[in-house]
Image (cartoon, grey):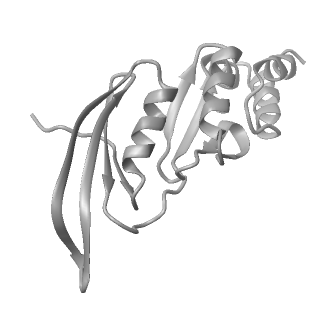
Amino acid sequence: MATILPFLWFNAEAEEARDFYLSVFKNGKALQSMQTTDWVSGPKRRVPVATYDFDLEGVHFRALDAGPGDKFNEAVSFFIQTEDQKETDYYWDALTADGGVEHPCGWLQDKFGVYWQVTPAAMLRLIGDADRVKAERAMQAMHKMKKIILADIEAAYAG
């Protein structure tokens, strides 16, 4: 059976990124690492390649050091569904630390440029409610936030 896993290309920070993510996610573990000889990735460009496999909350990742490549962007992000405000705050604060960037509606970019969405499960229920008036109030409140503050969304939902 085929295997699909997120594959993250870094210039030279793959090991550092892996270690950072392992420090953030409590159910993370380092797996295999591999360093190879020079690899040709274009005309007159040779770079040493290293890969670092790791697991975060049951998801297998592979990080690659292979020299300059395309930057990460919000077209691909990792979604963290949290249980409550405390867990939301934990992931938000950890992933924005040391140079991360806050974006609207619960999105952020960590110090390596990888995009994440940190979203409380309760917010998803509120903005998906069948009462579209309440759901729209919750949605409008979310649009005014960077980090999601669940109490503010709940208050907007309630009217």
Q: How many marks?
A: 0
Name the residue nearer the viewer: 113 or 138.
113
Q: In the rendered view, does 79 fall on the left or right side of 7?
A: right
Q: Residue at x 38, y 49 (%)?
A: 14
Name the residue nearer the viewer: 53 or 139.
53
Q: Position of residue 45 (x, y in %)?
A: 27, 80
Name the residue nearer the viewer: 151 or 85.
85
Q: Quadrant of residue 43?
A: bottom left
Q: Residue furthest bottom?
A: 44
- Quadrant housing the C terminus: top right
Q: In the rendered view, does 58 fall on the left or right side of 138?
A: left
Q: Residue at x 18, y 68 (%)?
A: 38
Q: Position of residue 122 (x, y in %)?
A: 65, 16
Q: Residue furthest left?
A: 1
Q: Position of residue 101 (x, y in %)?
A: 68, 48
Q: Residue at x 67, y 31 (%)?
A: 93
User: Where 36 falls versus 140 (above or below)?
Assistant: below
Q: In the rendered view, does 78 fall on the left or right side of 91?
A: left
User: Where 14 falls versus 141 (above or below)?
Assistant: below
User: Where 105 falls versus 24 (above or below)?
Assistant: below
Q: Residue at x 70, y 17 (%)?
A: 85
Q: Position of residue 125 (x, y in %)?
A: 64, 18
- Quadrant housing the N terminus: top left
Q: Quadrant of residue 31?
A: top left
